[in-house]
C-alpha cells in the first residue's frame, strides 16, 4: 500500500473500518488541524467563562454537528442545553467527527479522545479529569510502523449509559464498556467490561458487582 497512490476516499474508508491507513495525507492532516483549531477556540472560551449556549455552539463545531439549536430564551432551548454534554476544557479530540456523546454527559478537564475510529459515550456518563480514550493503534512491527511514513489503524470504543470514570483512566482501542460501570481512578481498561460492575487497576479487573435490580432499562437519545 503506497500512500502516494492511495485514493483519499479509500484511505479514509480504511481508517473508519479499523484497517491500516495513512494518517499524514493532506485531507486527514487538514481534518485534524480543523479540529485542533475548534478545540482551541472552545478551550479559550471555556476558560473565559462563556455562556452555556456559546459553549454548546462551539462544542457542536468540534463535532461538526450542524443540528440547529432552538431559539434563545425558549423552554426548548433550556431542554436542549441541559441535554448537551457539559465539557470543562481544556479538551482534545483528533477529528471530532467520529465521536458521539449521549445526553447529560459530563467531561472534566484535560481529557483526550483519539477518534481514529468511532468513540461512543452513553447518556449520563461522568468522565473525570485527565481521562483518555484511545481508538487509535499502531503496528507492533517497527519496520511496518515506520515513524511518520508508516500506516496506523484503530478500533472503536463503546461506553454504555450511566458510567463513571475516575480521574486518569485510560481506555484502550476496541474496548466495550457496559452500562452502569464505575472505573477506578488511574485504571487502564484493556478489555471489555460487563454491565453494572466496578473495575480498577492496570489492567482493570472487576472488584465489585452492583445489585441494581431493574432500574433504568430505557435507552437515552444520542446528542
Image: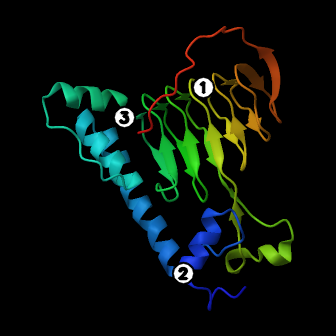
Q: Quadrant of residue 14?
A: bottom right
Q: Residue at left 33%, top 40%? A: 46
Residue marked by disc 2: 8
Q: In the image, what residue occupies the spot 52% across and 41% down?
A: 110
User: Which is more toward the observer, 54 or 155?
Assistant: 155
Asked if the residue under mark 3 is in contact with the one under mark 1, i.e. CB atoms within 8 Å, the reply is no
CA distance separating discs 2 and 1: 37 Å
Q: Position of residue 31 (x, y in %)?
A: 45, 68
Q: Earlier in the sequence, mark 2 or mark 1?
A: 2
Q: Locate the C terminus by quadrant.
A: top left
- Tell me, for residue 163, which label it has, or none: 1
Q: How is the image coloured?
A: rainbow
Give the residue at mark 3. Answer: 84
Q: Residue at x 12, y 29 (%)?
A: 73
Could you say whether the residue bearing mark 2 is in a helix, strand or loop? helix
- The earlier-in-sequence mark between 3 and 2 is 2
Depth check: 40 or 85 in front?
85
Q: For the residue carrying disc 1, how many other residues have a C-alpha within 10 Å: few (<14), some (14-19), or many (20+)?
A: many
**Is residue 220 placed above or below 37 in the rendered structure?**
above
| Residue toward you, 157 or 129 | 157
- CA–CA distance in space, label 3 to label 2: 33 Å
Q: Secondary structure at mark 3?
A: loop
Is the residue marked by circle 2 packed among few (<14), some (14-19), or many (20+) residues within 10 Å? some
Question: With 132 as the anchor, is 52 left or right in this view?
Answer: left
Upstream in the sequence, badge 1 or badge 3?
3
Q: Residue furthest bottom?
A: 5
The reply to whether residue 158 is in sight is: yes
Q: CA distance from mark 1 to mark 3?
A: 17 Å
Of the 4 image quadrants, the one containing the N terminus is bottom right
Dot 1 falls on a residue whose secondary structure is loop
Q: Residue at x 65, y 34 (%)?
A: 168
Tell me, yes or no, whether the two marked residues, 3 and 2, touch with CB atoms within 8 Å.
no
Amino acid at each position: 500500500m503506497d500512500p502516494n497512490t492511495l485514493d483519499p476516499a479509500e484511505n479514509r474508508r480504511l481508517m473508519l473500518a479499523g484497517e491500516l491507513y495513512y494518517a499524514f495525507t493532506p485531507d486527514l492532516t487538514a481534518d485534524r488541524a480543523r479540529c485542533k483549531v475548534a478545540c482551541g477556540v472552545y478551550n479559550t472560551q471555556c476558560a473565559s467563562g462563556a455562556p452555556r449556549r456559546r459553549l454548546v455552539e462551539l462544542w457542536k463545531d468540534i463535532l461538526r454537528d450542524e443540528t440547529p439549536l432552538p431559539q434563545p430564551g425558549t423552554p426548548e432551548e433550556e431542554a436542549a442545553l441541559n441535554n448537551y454534554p457539559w465539557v470543562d476544557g481544556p479538551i482534545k479530540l483528533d477529528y471530532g467527527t467520529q465521536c458521539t456523546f449521549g445526553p447529560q454527559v459530563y467531561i472534566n478537564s484535560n481529557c483526550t479522545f483519539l477518534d481514529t475510529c468511532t468513540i461512543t459515550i452513553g447518556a449520563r456518563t461522568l468522565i473525570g479529569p485527565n481521562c483518555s480514550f484511545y481508538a487509535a493503534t499502531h503496528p507492533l512491527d517497527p519496520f511496518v510502523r515506520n515513524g511518520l511514513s508508516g500506516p496506523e489503524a484503530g478500533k472503536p470504543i463503546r461506553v454504555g449509559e450511566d458510567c463513571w470514570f475516575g480521574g486518569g483512566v485510560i481506555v484502550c482501542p476496541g474496548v466495550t464498556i457496559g452500562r452502569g460501570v464505575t472505573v477506578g481512578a488511574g485504571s487502564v481498561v484493556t478489555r471489555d467490561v460487563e454491565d453494572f460492575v466496578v473495575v480498577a487497576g492496570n489492567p482493570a479487573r472487576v472488584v465489585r458487582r452492583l445489585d441494581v435490580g431493574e432500574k433504568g432499562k430505557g435507552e437515552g437519545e444520542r446528542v
